[in-house]
Image: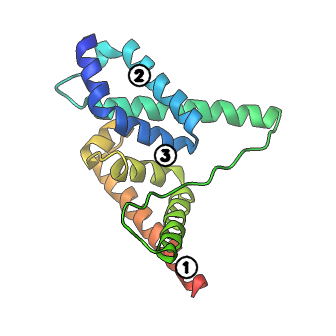
Amino acid sequence: MNCTELSQCIELYGKAIYSFCWQLTKNQSDADDLYQETFLKATELRQRIDPDGNPKGFLFSITLRLWKDRRRKLARRQRIAPTEALSEETDCVCTDELTPEEIVLSHELCEWVWRAADNLPERYRVPLYLYYTADLSVEQIASALHIPQGTVKSRLHHARKAMKQDLEARQYERA
């Protein structure tokens, strides 16, 4: 893949990659850094990207690998010198004209869904994010994660089932 084709990939998939970076990091500055690292690495590996194959999946696999490496490094540093993590609240965007009560309920529901997704083990959370936020197909996810398509389908099923149970439990506690 040459530089022009890579630029086209960035234009086509940049927003989806950034959204995925944000889903993984839950922090704008970390998402920005991961996004930039992804495309720097893609520039280095542009000869290995097949434009007729699955360039979107390849870019997502680069992002995921970089994120895992970063997490591993942070975990090692935390064992050596622990620091407190800052938490950021997630905002859900309401596009409809809603009453204040509906807005509060909508934000609460969004928070529940994000928490349920965040509570999933990584093996279920990553395919779920790739499927729903990055709009990748099961085949593309399998290619990006280097696992069989059946495994992706199974992990998506287990993730949905776990989230449903979590959300139903929250709903029951609320009532």
Kind of residue at badge 1: Ala
Disc 2 secondary structure class = helix
Q: Residues within 10 Å of mark 1 (few under 14, many from 20)?
A: few
Taking 5 as reference, is 134 above or below it? below
Disc on res. 23: 3
Q: Residue at x 46, y 29 (%)?
A: 35
Report the residue marked by disc 2: 39
Image-based side of 77 in relation to 38, left or right: right
Q: Residues within 10 Å of mark 2 (few under 14, many from 20)?
A: many
* Image position, residue 167 (x, y; %): 50, 73
**Residue sitting farthest toward the right:** 81
* Image position, residue 23 (x, y; %): 49, 46
Kind of residue at badge 3: Gln
* Image position, residue 142 (x, y; %): 32, 43
Q: Residues within 10 Å of mark 3 (few under 14, many from 20)?
A: many
Give residue 79's quadrant in the image.
top right
Q: Residues under labels 1 and 2: Cα distance? A: 41 Å
Report the mark closest to the observer, 3 or 1: 3
In the image, 129 versus 151, the foreground residue is 129
Q: Residues under labels 3 and 2: Cα distance? A: 17 Å
Report the mark closest to the observer, 1 or 2: 2
Report the residue marked by disc 1: 169
N-terminal label among 1 and 2: 2
Dots 3 and 2: beta carbons under 8 Å? no
Q: Residue at x 76, y 36 (%)?
A: 78
